[in-house]
Image (spheres, rainbow, N blue to C red):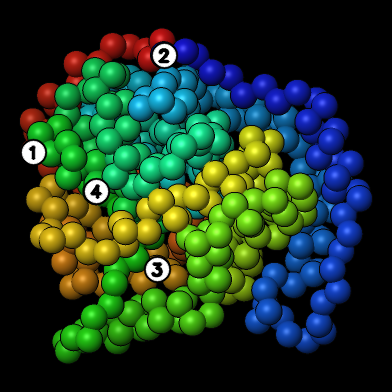
């Protein structure tokens, strides 16, 4: 394992600024809002701030406060942050992001969680500093196997997993592949597949179930393209930072439902990471490689699982129990799909409460790891 520090050459930032200045803006219809995609004013305003107001160097320094490392697993470079808790007996906790997020989403929860957990925060292969990938096959199961290997290399014999979005698929898969070592799974932004049996569901659950259909009908275009033609998409995103911004902004703004739910700097930090690492295409491939992971497993996982539901999520407990051994279910009125950014305190508290409620052996005999990753 090697220590890693984010150190982007100034020439790359200069090139980014020049490309932003040369943006050729498309035409746009008046009065249609978000119904045709991201409105021109929303992208233009954020692009102008990216050029003249946003400081990558400030966020680079912020992220470098997290100790980071790289290692090679299954032929792929894997980047990860590793924070050891002051508590030597702390439970190791593996945090996995989704798309269009990066490991940077967890920066705000890292400090409070590291008081009680040893944190391992990797970049999914194909994303950010773990990318790009150079071969096919990096779907959910292969990523999960890499995560189990990473935790083993770090010396962690018992650990928990947590994830949202694609992380909510990868995290329980780690438990299925490594059941003797994973003590619990915590999920947010979990999409539960709807079936015809809605008898007995609450009004809120029915509404959340309808959200899956609304997503398929109105907002799933990005997933269809990334799941079928990611290479075709990659040419435009690799050549135009404004194109990359618009593509990611459509998801970050919850397709027009919550444009104010994330700060400009949070959005741009992730977009900038994608741009600087040229991983728009390789990260999109996860949708093609991981398509089968959306199907429910033959039987529910056995590892105790907690699900945190934030506004906008489509999680329904009855449907979640088809795939998971759900022992804790929390619903919140604040935050959203990107809970680590939108409601970091609520998310951290729910994670802590779940794992603290597990057996003393899970919390107190969690690690044989050494004090550093190096």
Instruction: Give the residue at x 84% y 36%.
Output: 15
Q: Closer to the camera, 330 or 233? A: 233
Q: Which residue is mark 4?
A: 172
Mark carried by residue 1: 2
Instruction: Give the residue at x 40% y 42%.
Output: 138
What kind of element bears circle 2?
Answer: loop
Is residue 204 at least partly visible in the picture? Answer: no
Q: Which residue is mark 3?
A: 313
- Image quadrant holding the N terminus, namely top left
- Image quadrant holding the C terminus, namely top left
Which tag, 4 or 2, sits closer to the chain's start?
Answer: 2
Q: Is residue 5 above or below residue 62?
A: above
10 Å neighbourhood of mark 3: few (<14), some, or many (≥20)?
many
- Which marked residue is nearer to the observer: mark 3 or mark 4? 4
Q: Position of residue 21 (x, y in %)?
A: 91, 48
Q: Is residue 83 above or below residue 34?
A: above
Which tag, 2 or 3, sits closer to the chain's start?
Answer: 2
């Amino acid at each position: 394992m090697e220590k890693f520090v984010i150190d982007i050459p100034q020439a790359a930032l200069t090139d980014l600024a020049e490309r932003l200045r040369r943006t050729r803006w498309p035409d746009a219809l008046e009065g249609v809002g978000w119904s045709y995609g991201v409105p021109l004013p929303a992208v233009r305003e954020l692009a102008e701030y990216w050029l003249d107001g946003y400081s990558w160097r400030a966020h680079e320094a912020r992220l470098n406060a997290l100790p980071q490392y790289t290692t090679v697993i299954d032929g792929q470079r894997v980047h990860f942050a590793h924070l050891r808790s002051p508590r030597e007996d702390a439970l190791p906790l593996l945090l996995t992001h989704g798309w269009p997020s990066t490991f940077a989403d967890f920066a705000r929860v890292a400090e409070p969680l590291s008081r009680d957990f040893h944190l391992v925060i990797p970049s999914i292969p194909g994303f950010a500093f773990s990318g790009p990938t150079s071969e096919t096959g990096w779907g959910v199961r292969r990523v999960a196997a890499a995560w189990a290997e990473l935790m083993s290399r770090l010396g962690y014999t018992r650990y928990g997993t947590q994830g949202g979005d694609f992380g909510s698929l990868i995290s329980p898969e780690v438990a299925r592949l490594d059941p003797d070592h994973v003590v619990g799974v915590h999920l947010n932004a979990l999409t539960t597949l709807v079936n015809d049996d809605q008898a007995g569901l609450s009004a809120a659950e029915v509404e959340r179930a309808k959200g899956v259909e609304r997503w398929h009908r109105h907002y799933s275009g990005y997933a269809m393209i990334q799941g079928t033609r990611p290479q075709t998409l990659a040419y435009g995103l690799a050549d135009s930072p404004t194109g990359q911004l618009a593509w990611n902004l459509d998801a970050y703004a919850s397709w027009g439902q919550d444009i104010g739910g994330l700060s400009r700097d949070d959005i741009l930090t992730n977009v900038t990471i994608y741009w600087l690492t040229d991983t728009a295409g390789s990260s999109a491939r996860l949708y093609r490689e991981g398509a089968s992971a959306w199907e429910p497993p033959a039987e529910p996982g056995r590892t105790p699982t907690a699900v945190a539901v934030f506004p906008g999520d489509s999680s329904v407990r009855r449907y979640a129990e088809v795939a998971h051994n759900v022992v804790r279910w929390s619903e919140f009125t604040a935050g959203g799909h990107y809970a680590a950014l939108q409601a970091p305190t609520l998310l951290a508290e729910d994670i802590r409460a779940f794992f603290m409620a597990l057996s003393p052996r899970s919390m107190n005999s969690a690690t044989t790891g050494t004090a550093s990753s190096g």
